[in-house]
């Protein structure tokens, strides 16, 4: 048997963090078992499904690095096939026409509420002669569900789960207007696509019982269901926007690398011993359903930040410069060369691309560079005078590398009889426009002789050096 799974989002909004994890788990499961992972867009809710949402889902999956197999299936385009199955079930006697009016259905619901019973269809037309159908009423087609016994699911995560059939009613398969319901569409699509395993959030667990009944009514093999616990916020409550229930594009904008987010999502509800840093190759090798826990996972931005910092440090410098160009660029050749030289020091101090961009911006600022308030405060007359003399002292410095520069500056400090801070702080302000930056000697070396001296000259008010 070739393992075939699918990710089937509804394009009624962004690809949220839970959906991205579900997509990842399906993709890894398929790759681990040498199978295929298909993408189906469940766009049957035309009132809420939008093209921008479809594009956001596809773009988000591509950015995450999850290439799906085969052509994308649009569920709405398969409505005729769904209706065909409903009519075949009708002919086989596993479904029937129901002529209840909306008023009759509401009366049925009111009666159940008054009696304190679950709201279910009471089977009025289950065994009734269609000849008694009222004129002008378009029927729905309902599943002739089993009324005794139980429906059992051997869930790959939850274990064996059982529901008594008397607790379920004859669900609608085809509406009066001829459109298929979600339950029918999903089953027919999964069957036609050859889906062997259904891996999805446990909010779909109750759907699995109804869908199993549709499979059995058609004589089709039921796929292996696996329902993943949902993601909760740090406080253990259901995930919401205040916790970070955002679209994948928002995480991208916040400066997370796709490989870091993949690693984080992988560990959000799945584990392999104590391993935290897991490469893409290891993820494919190790991932399987038994590693998924039954308890809801909790979103932890501190852990995500730390993980992202690791992947930033591991990333190639040229790639990071390209990513910074999207945020603070474009860069000319000189600016790009400066950032490449600075990247080793910059990426060691950043946990997100936002931080990296903020820390790198001063390197490519045009002279005279902007100074923040704290940097401005460093520009006392005494400090400016010191930097004027420092610039003069460095004017003949031939070896513009970090170690020789440190030696030269320290010699200047000793000759001036001042403490390191008296020179270092205004020097940092002059070079970076702020009172925090990578090491000042590193910054001087990266900027190069002309740019570094030019910034010192601007800060100290010199007209020439």
Image (spheres, rainbow, N blue to C red):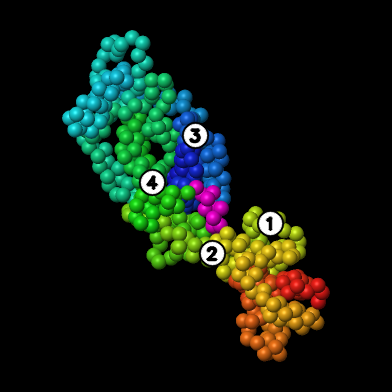
Q: Mark 4 points at which residue?
A: 201
Which of 462 and 89 lies nearest the eye of the viewer?
A: 462
Res 286 quadrant in image: bottom left
Q: Mark 2 points at which residue?
A: 351
Magenta residues? 247-259
Q: Which residue lies furthest to the front in this view?
A: 381
Query: Going 24% across and 24% down the picture, which residue do you hit?
Result: 108
Q: Confirm or deny contact between disc 1 and disc 4 (CB under 8 A).
A: no
Q: Confirm or deny contact between disc 2 and disc 4 (CB under 8 A).
A: no
Expressed as whole percent of the image width and height from the top left, the position of residue 303 reads 45, 63
Viewer-nearest of discs 3 and 1: 1
Viewer-nearest of discs 2 and 4: 2
**Residue 216 visible in the current orientation:** no
Q: Is mark 3 on a helix, strand or loop?
A: loop
Query: Going 27% across and 41% down the picture, which residue do you hit?
Result: 152
Viewer-nearest of discs 3 and 4: 3
Expressed as whole percent of the image width and height from the top left, the position of residue 32 reads 46, 53
Label annotation for residue 329:
1
Magenta stretch secondary structure, dominant: helix
As measured in the structure, the alpha-carbon distance from the residue carrying label 1 to the one carrying label 4 is 40 Å
Viewer-nearest of discs 1 and 4: 1
Label annotation for residue 49:
3
Crowding near the residue tagged with mark 2, few <14, some 14–19, many ≥20 C-alpha atoms within 10 Å: many
Q: Looking at the image, is mark 2 or mark 3 earlier in the sequence? A: 3
As measured in the structure, the alpha-carbon distance from the residue carrying label 2 to the one carrying label 3 is 35 Å
């Amino acid at each position: 048997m070739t393992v075939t799974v699918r990710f089937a989002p509804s394009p009624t909004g962004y690809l949220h963090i839970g959906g991205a994890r579900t997509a990842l788990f399906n993709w890894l499961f398929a790759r681990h078992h040498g199978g295929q992972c298909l993408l189906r867009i469940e766009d049957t809710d035309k009132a809420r499904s939008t093209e921008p949402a479809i594009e956001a889902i596809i773009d988000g999956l591509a950015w995450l690095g999850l290439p799906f197999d085969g052509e994308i299936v649009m569920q709405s385009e398969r409505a005729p096939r769904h209706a065909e199955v409903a009519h075949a079930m009708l002919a086989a006697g596993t479904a029937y026409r129901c002529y209840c009016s909306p008023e009759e259905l509401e009366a049925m619901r009111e009666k159940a509420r008054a009696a304190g019973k679950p709201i279910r269809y009471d089977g009025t037309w289950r065994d009734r002669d269609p000849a008694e159908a009222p004129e002008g009423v378009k029927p729905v087609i309902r599943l002739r569900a089993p009324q005794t016994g139980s429906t059992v699911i051997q869930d790959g995560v939850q274990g064996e789960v059982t529901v008594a059939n008397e607790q379920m009613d004859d669900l609608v398969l085809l509406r009066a207007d001829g459109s298929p319901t979600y339950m029918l569409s999903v089953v027919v699509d999964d069957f036609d696509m050859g889906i062997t395993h259904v891996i999805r959030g446990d909010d779909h667990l109750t759907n699995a019982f109804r869908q199993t009944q549709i499979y059995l009514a058609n004589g089709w093999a039921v796929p292996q269901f696996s329902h993943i616990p949902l993601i909760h916020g740090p406080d253990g409550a259901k995930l919401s926007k205040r916790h970070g229930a955002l679209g994948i594009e928002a995480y991208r904008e916040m400066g997370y690398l796709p490989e870091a987010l993949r690693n984080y999502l992988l560990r959000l509800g799945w584990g392999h011993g104590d391993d935290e840093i897991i490469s893409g190759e290891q993820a494919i090798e190790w991932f399987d359903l038994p590693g998924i826990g039954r308890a809801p996972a909790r979103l932890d931005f501190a852990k995500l930040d730390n993980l992202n910092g690791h992947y930033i440090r591991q990333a190639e410098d040229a790639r990071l410069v390209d990513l910074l160009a999207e945020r603070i660029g474009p860069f000319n050749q000189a600016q790009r060369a400066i950032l490449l030289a600075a990247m080793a020091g910059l990426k060691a101090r950043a946990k997100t691309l936002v931080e990296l961009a903020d820390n790198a911006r001063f390197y490519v600022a045009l002279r005279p560079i902007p100074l923040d308030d704290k940097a401005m405060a460093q520009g006392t007359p005494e400090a400016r005078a010191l930097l004027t003399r420092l610039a003069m002292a460095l004017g003949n410095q031939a070896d513009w590398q970090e170690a020789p520069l440190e030696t030269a500056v320290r010699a200047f400090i000793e000759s001036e009889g001042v403490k390191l801070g008296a020179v270092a702080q205004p020097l940092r302000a002059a070079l970076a426009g702020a009172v925090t930056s990578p090491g000042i000697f590193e910054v001087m070396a990266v900027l190069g002789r002309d740019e570094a001296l030019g910034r010192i000259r601007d800060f100290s008010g010199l007209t020439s050096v």
